[in-house]
Image (cartoon, helix red, strand yellow):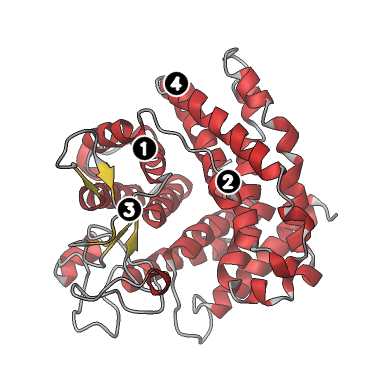
Amino acid sequence: MIGGHSFARLAGELMAEFAARTGLEGEAPPRRYLWTDAFAVCNFLGLYRGSGERRHLDLALRLVDQVHHTLGRHRPDDPRQGWISGLDEREGERHPTRGGLRIGKPLPERGPREPCDPQLEWDRDGQYFHYLTQWMHALHRVSQETGDVTFHRWARELAAAAHAAFTYQPPEGGPPRMVWKMSIDLSRPLVPAMGQHDPLDALVTYLELESGAPQGGGAGDVGPGLADEIAGAAAMCAGGRWATDDPLGIGGLLSDAARLSAIVLRDGGYLPLLHRLLADAAASLRAFARTPSLAVPAAQRLAFRELGLAIGLRAVEGLAPRLAGHGDLAPAVAVLEPYLPLAARITGFWADPANRRDRTWSDHRDINTVMLATSLAPAGYLGS
């Protein structure tokens, strides 16, 4: 086991390698992928906070700019050009997230008349809602660290655009629903099924943006209000159940629980939702603990999924003292505490270079690298 200082140093080394490998620094052409880059932005913010070195903040800001000018615009192999929002160049620069952001997959999106190949669809471009919420969070964190409301406004504009495109009212009635994957221009669904946690991610992220708006400036400065989006997401979450045995999904539940607890403590409300979320997270951890996942060799494991769990566990480490005044929540949080050591177990395993030599690591090197760095030094992502 290596100590906290060594963890921070390794996180910095991993992010330096990522910056060079993906064209953020040096001569390599930019290679952007939205999920990975959302975590990377937060990691650079954390490195800046921990070291005070301006170069880390500069990398975070440069990465935001690259993402917007790469994934906010049409692909080089697409006959369409310019901003995917359809805005002209001047307005697109002012509102780079108003049309959403591409995933960054290697293959072009499926055409309107092209049949869906479920296996091939994983490698096709488009837009994923749960990637967009990660980017909203990253932009919000940049605004918090810099005090620049522009990034917060871009996050809100992205929230409004994504919600309008991904949600729909079923013809048979009932609460709204969401599609899982949309086309690059948000004009048509590519995968109509609803992701299990997408409505929850939507609600928690919208609440984070609405309750955490930067102080100062007029309403126009912070971007569109999200009251309607919050109401729609809350309707989709009513009666929801989110238990899963997928480690990445569990990590997302835990991170959402930590973010929601901060909102509950600050603004009140949503206490029943937090209770339900904590209960489902506990059930998920019990299910995962019964599997042999962490006992098998590295060649049989997917690092980024496990590291997502480690990040979520790190997010809830401080929940118990923060919620001490909520006696009814204390037992729900206490149930999670026996699982907290899993974070160090997972992070320590993947911090060992010997466990990063197999193809299961190299085939997903960028996302593995960035999420390992987050689990090693999570302050930038967690905002703590």
Residue 251, disc: 2
Mark with earlier residue (1, 3): 3
Distance of label 1 from label 2 (alpha carbons): 17 Å
Real-space Cα separation, disc 3 to disc 2, in angstroms: 22 Å
| Residue annotated with mark 3 | 193
Look at 54% across and 35% down and name the residue there. 258
Residue 313 falls in which quadrant of the image? top right
Gap in Å between the C-alphas at discs 4 and 2? 20 Å
Image-based side of 90 in relation to 263, left or right: left
In contact (CB < 8 Å): disc 1 and disc 3: no
Check disc 3: other Cα within 10 Å, few if <14, some if 14-19, many if 20+: few
Q: Image height check: is 142 above or below 111?
A: above
Q: For mark 4, what is the residue?
A: 272
110 relative to 6, above or below? below
Point out which mark residue 163 bears. none
Amino acid identity at mark 4: Pro
Say if mark 3 contacts mark 2, CB within 8 Å: no
Alpha carbons under labels 1 and 3: distance apart: 18 Å
Which is nearer the N-term, disc 3 or disc 2? 3
Badge 1 marks a residue whose secondary structure is: helix
Q: Please tell me whether mark 4 sits on a helix, a strand or a loop.
A: helix
